[in-house]
Image (cartoon, rainbow, N blue to C red):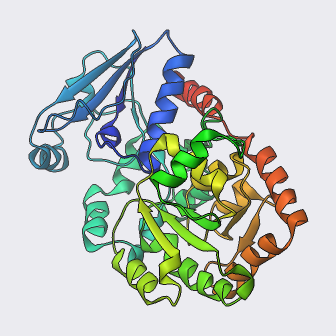
Amino acid sequence: MNIGIDIRSLMNKNYSGVAEYTYNLLDNLFKLDSYNKYYLFYNSKQNITENLPQFNYHHVKFKGYQYPNKLFNLSLKLFKYPKLDKLITNLDHFFIPNFNFSAFSKNFPITCTVHDLSFELFPEFFSTKRQLWHKIIKPTHILKSVKTIIADSHNTKNDLINLYQIKEDKIKVIYPGIDHNLYRKIEANDVKNKLIKEQYQLPDNFIFYLGTIEPRKNITGLIKSFNLIKKNNKYSDLHLVIAGEKGWKYKQVFETAEKSPYTDQIKFIGYVKRQDKAYLYNLAEVFVFPSFYEGFGLPVLEAQACGTPVVSGLNSSLPEILNDTCLLIKPDNINEISQSVLKILNSPKLKQDLITKGLINSKNYSWLQTARQTLGILTN
């Protein structure tokens, strides 16, 4: 078979959730399947070849185009042209790892992954530009024309059924995975621990958050809960480290941090390189992820794979993938967040129990398994 794949999410050097999903899935898919041929579609007026991943496989070919992006998207939207399946000849199937502007020939088989419907459920968490983008894209139109929908979780599947009235048998749940070669428990005496601490200027003791800085992630709630924790003199040397790129509506996060009486102990370190993440997870005392909504939530599993206890939001897909392996909190309750962190810090037994449970839980998720299940859909 000849399979086309939209890799427009991989055109930027820095990867966020969707790009992480796309890269890891494809890398494992290409290793797993050397029989079928894959054609990777992208479009950019700028030369972005240096940013693209190095998929050096004989059965994988890049198909890049240099149309002006705004005109290209406008043409796809208004005129349904060009047909992406016709740009790459003799395709049998096309895979879209995330919503994007697209147009296809009638009845051409398409598979699309839906990570979450947060833009429908919580539009207030998105900038006007992001809201407008989703309205123009019209995900419902895309999803009703595709052959199969892959949902990151049963929670996302239920959202698709309830919000878009998608037929249940059209949706297949395939969990994303964890790169266990990358995310693992690292010995305290590993020489790179010291280098990472110096590189990111990390304190000795810190609570850790990693993810895009945007309202849905509830980082302001995390900062307010940190303020409550710091009232306990026992933790005068405890810091809060926040990692991740700025998304949208992020100003309030930085304003909340600046107004904190402990602002000197709140550190923003920006985007973290993929190869450095595991060290940050390992160096942290607790990983706190008080998000209001997640389609899946890769960071909580990455943290668990590194042997770091987790405090997570009690909502959306998070209880589904974590169950009793972490402390689940109501994200709008800062007292509950702070008390959960303190429970872990104050109880070595609880901390070790969560570490053990987390390590076992994270082993249930692998990119090879994700790739194998996805391959079954693409070649069916």
Side of 374 relative to 314 (left or right): left
Question: Where on the picture, by quarter, is residue 37?
Answer: top left
Q: How many marks?
A: 0
- Quarter of the figure with the C terminus: top right
Instruction: Give the image location of residue 185, x and y in percent.
Output: 71, 43
Q: Position of residue 355 (x, y in %)?
A: 80, 54
Residue 2 horizontal/vertical position (percent) = 38, 16
Q: Quadrant of the N terminus?
A: top left
Q: Picture coordinates of residue 240 (x, y %)?
A: 56, 72
On screen, residue 164 above or below 193: below
The residue closer to the viewer here, 225 or 95, is 225
65 is higher (above) or lower (below) than 190: above
Q: Is residue 159 left or right of residue 307?
A: left
Which quadrant of the figure has residue 136? bottom left
- Check the image and report above or below for 347 versus 303: below
- For image coordinates 26% across by 47% down, the residue present is 101
Q: Residue at x 65, y 31 (%)?
A: 369
- Residue sitting at 16 percent across and 30 percent down? 65
Residue at 50% in and 40% down: 275
